Amino acid sequence: MVGVTTQAGREAWRTILRLMFDGEGHGRMPEVCRAIGVPASMVKTLMHLSPDEPKAMRDLAEHYGCDASYITALVDDLEQRGFAERRPHPSDRRIRTVVLTPAGAEVKERLTEMLWTPPPAFSALSATEQRELRDLLRKVANADTVLTARAAAGR
Amino acid sequence: MVGVTTQAGREAWRTILRLMFDGEGHGRMPEVCRAIGVPASMVKTLMHLSPDEPKAMRDLAEHYGCDASYITALVDDLEQRGFAERRPHPSDRRIRTVVLTPAGAEVKERLTEMLWTPPPAFSALSATEQRELRDLLRKVANADTVLTARAAAGR
DNA sequence: TATTGTTATACTCTATAACTATA
DNA sequence: TATAGTTATAGAGTATAACAATA
């Protein structure tokens, strides 16, 4: 870690929150839910699953900080809609993993497209500025990944 | 509006989402709720109220895109905790407005401090970079405010 | 007649507790 | 004995419908 967070850094973060909670980003999640016809919890779960990387149900519960029984209900719902499947773990028969079906992967594709489309206001920046913004944010996010992993390991 | 959203702009937005939902920002709201002892819905409402600018309940419902009856329940809860008060509207007696009490303002102060503190990863940027990031984000957020207002007016 | 807010009610989301199977 | 997941149940959170008061 090279320095400290300045007042400008605080304002930058606050502006991100403003974009997410007051601005156009605010209605994004409900809008996506209505378009796809699934609850927000399912959207978040779909975004963390993939067709070829099985995720243990326990890991999902840990990631969302919720009870395991809720993951059971969520995955039941995903299975009923044909978006995901439970698979046995190759070596530990207590563990059940979850993967997306082709239909689930397809709906995740649509979700991703909608969520990752920036608010129109991004076009107020020139192409150069958009690159600068990307680079600065990347630097923060990469540091965040390191710090989060370190915190998780030290726990 | 001066231009279009580039691929870099898309990546910038995606990185913001990553910070908010995968990174340190992810656990922020639950953490704040536990610290203050109030549900997330109340945190959001407190952040939109003030001691001296009365807000009509109808406006709260519109802002959150929820039913008016839910605002009634929320404000009931805020009043029972001594954080807010209903006040009559000066000219329209159908309308009830809401203001924060001193206790509510104090808890909002604590909430704000916690929410507006950036993730530690911001310190990976130099002071100059933090200023650059702030300026770029401001530009986006200001454009967003204009566009959101325009969209609301055109409705 | 249309709008603001409340009440009563029902539905959805999420957690707790008790249980089964495997390690 | 400890861990992964399920079931049954209870508690928040949020919406719908019917209603009272005011415009």
Image (cartoon, coloured by chain):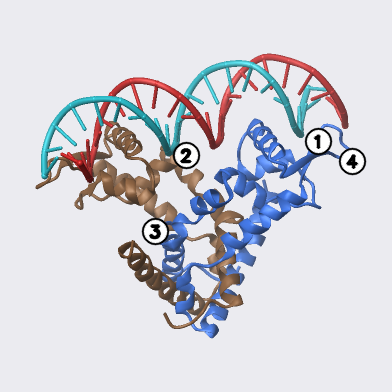
Chain colours: A brown, B blue, C cyan, D red
Which disc number belongs to residue A153? none
The secondary structure type at the circle numbered 3 is loop
The amino acid pointed to by label 2 is Arg
Question: Is B32 displayed left or right of A77 in the figure?
Answer: right
The secondary structure type at the circle numbered 1 is loop
Mark-to-mark CA distance, 2 and 4 = 38 Å
Tell me which chain the residue with mark 3 is part of.
B
Mark-to-mark CA distance, 2 and 1 = 31 Å
In the rendered image, residues at marks 2 and 3 fall on the same chain: no
Q: Which residue is mark 2?
A: A34
The amino acid pointed to by label 3 is Asp
Question: Is A34 displayed left or right of A110 in the figure?
Answer: right
Which of the 4 image quadrants contains residue B128? bottom right
Question: Is B122 displayed left or right of A83 in the figure?
Answer: right
Residue drawn where x is 89% and y is 41% of the image = B90
Q: A49 or B52: which is nearer to us?
A: B52
The amino acid pointed to by label 4 is Pro
Q: Which residue is mark 4?
A: B90
Tell me which chain the residue with mark 1 is part of.
B
Mark-to-mark CA distance, 2 and 3 = 23 Å
Residue drawn where x is 60% and y is 56% of the image = A23
Q: Which residue is mark 1?
A: B95
Q: Earlier in the sequence, mark 3 or mark 1?
A: 3
Q: Which residue is mark 3?
A: B22
Residue A52 point in image, percent of width and height: 19, 51
Report if residue B149 is visible in the image: no
Residue A155 point in image, percent of width and height: 34, 61
In the rendered image, residues at marks 4 and 1 fall on the same chain: yes
Residue B73 point in image, percent of width and height: 65, 33
In the rendered image, residues at marks 4 and 3 fall on the same chain: yes
Q: Say which quadrant the N terminus of chain A sits in.
A: bottom left
Q: Nearer the viewer, mark 2 or mark 3?
A: 3
